[in-house]
Amino acid sequence: MDTLVECVPNFSTCDATVIAAISEAIKASPGVSLLDVDPGTSTNRTVVTFVGTVDTIIPGALAAAKAAMPLIDMSTHKGEHPRFGAMDVCPFVPVRNVTMEDCADLAREMGKRLAEQNKVPVYLYGAAGTSEDRRRLPDIRQKALGEYEGIGANIANFPPDFGPAELVPSWGATAVGARKFLIAYNINLLGTKEQAMHIAFNVREKGRGGGDVPRPGRFKEVAGIGWFVDEYNMSQISVNCTDYEVTNIHTVYESCKDDAIRLGLAVVGSELVGLVPLACFMDIAAYYMERDNLFLPDERQRVALVVDRLGLNSVKHFDPDQMIIDYKCKVKDPPLMSMTVKEFVGILGARTSAPGGGSASALVAAMGSGLGSMMGWMTYGNVKFRDLDAEMRRAIGPLCAATDRLLYRIDADTDAFGDYMTAIRMPKGTEEEKKVREEAMQDGLKVAIDVPLETMKIADTCWDWMVELATVGNINCKSDLQVGARCLEVGIWGCWKNVEINMKDITDAAYIERVSKEAKELWERADLKSKQVLELMDKRD
């Protein structure tokens, strides 16, 4: 299985020569890709982002640390950002086919090997933390040790998880952890450092310290601080959103804007430090689309909306292809889906068992939903059908989404027999081996059945929208929608037949009864809805 892990080490330097050496060390490490290098002059800190597999990511991180060791001297370091080490933090983040626990295991292994390689103190944090007081990075870096300057006095009472319990003057200490995507985000304020700090205290989770009564801030999973950036000639409210699914950056941005207005100040855009996941942007786009009553089914248009609403081009150019990790590490489309029509039909008609009827059915179903979305688009924005714009907005999005998902099912169906074929090749010399082989074959067959069944379910989500389009859509697209309905019906029927033919070798009676019933009902609904669409269109002549 193709795995992808993100590693985001932060180095306490913005020296171009040092960063170049670290970057080259990462590039030279096999199996990893350097994605982003983001130095900050005021913070004297550089965020480096690279990705690799679970097997290659640790060597890449160790190579970066080895390069940094002789080049960074923490005893002379000054900067706005809290820090305690040359490689201050080194988090591992799950991206694709990797769990948080997998990343915690990577962090533990990295911590152990870093301490051995560089002879430095290493703390584990986040999902890899060994106790509750070692879960949050600020608790380790500031509260327990007092940043770099406090290590010598405090490390004996707060020993590292790996390495010596003593200050290494040139290095300090390193925190290695596993976490969700941390989004480092700065909001630009035309004001002073103190005013930026005041607003940061309002929005960050821990709020304001001191006094007998705690005063927490507004948002969970948000850390924040204020500073002044000489190179921009403005202050910034700098926040870390440690779980954007709990609090996303637009929520913080809008709240900071409100506070700035109350203080008679101006927020002038924002900047992202390091890469962000596409899902984060899609959540933000959904908020602004609902707030501003916008219809943007196109993904790239949604990204452009987020860039505009957050003012992400205000202090430096924001390039989505470089800053959104899904685009930066974009996986190639699967092979069958990537073929030309001529290539696909050619291989479909060749003397091979795959691709076969299941892949063809997925493609035909995608053509059906695609023709439905076509009619929606030919109706939406048309002066003659202006009163239908709201209905078309509701229909086009789901149909476009279903089309995309169905296209990926072309390859999924061909790949579905992989587990079954692997099981067939398993040894069968003993009774125990025969038993294990048979169980694996049964599991493989269920995968081969579940894949076309899932394709049927995706295609089924289109019917209500197809019926609505047949009722009110642009009549000039009559034949297009009728062809689309037939394609959707045939695609579902073809998947049903694939379910049936593989069911004959299943021995699980309960599974047979449940899946056969579900597949048959989906086909019967397709037959009914297809006829309904055709009849509705004929009545509109």
Image: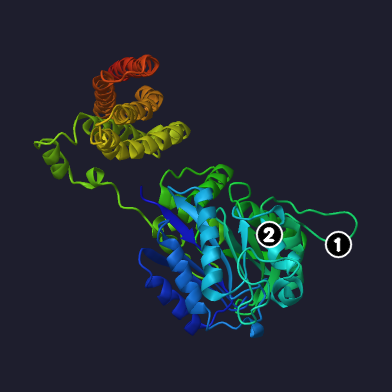
Residue 76 x, y percent position in the rendering: 65, 85
Instruction: State the residue at coordinates (57%, 54%).
Output: 179
Secondary structure found at label 2: strand
Q: Hey, what amino acid is under mark 1? A: Gly
The residue positioned farthest toward the left in the image shown: 351
Q: Hey, what amino acid is under mark 2? A: Ala
| Viewer-closest of 211 and 379 | 211
Secondary structure found at label 1: loop
Q: How many marks?
A: 2
Residue of label 1: 210
Instruction: State the residue at coordinates (39%, 65%).
Output: 33
Instruction: State the residue at coordinates (45%, 80%).
Output: 21
In the rendered structure, the answer to whether residue 449 lies left or right of residue 174 reads: left
Instruction: Examine the rendered structure and indicate whether residue 534 appears above or below residue 410.
Output: above
| Viewer-closest of 276 and 99 | 99
What's the coloring here? rainbow
Instruction: Examine the rendered structure and indicate whether residue 298 appears above or below residue 438.
Output: below
Instruction: State the residue at coordinates (35%, 38%).
Output: 405
Q: Can residue 312 be seen from the camera position used here?
A: no
Residue 228 x, y percent position in the rendering: 68, 75
Residue of label 2: 223
The image quarter containing residue 178 is bottom right
Residue 122 x, y percent position in the rendering: 61, 67
| Viewer-closest of 181 and 456 | 181
For marks 1 and 2, the one nearer the N-term is: 1
Q: Which numbered dot is residue 266?
A: none
Q: Can residue 138 be seen from the camera position used here?
A: yes
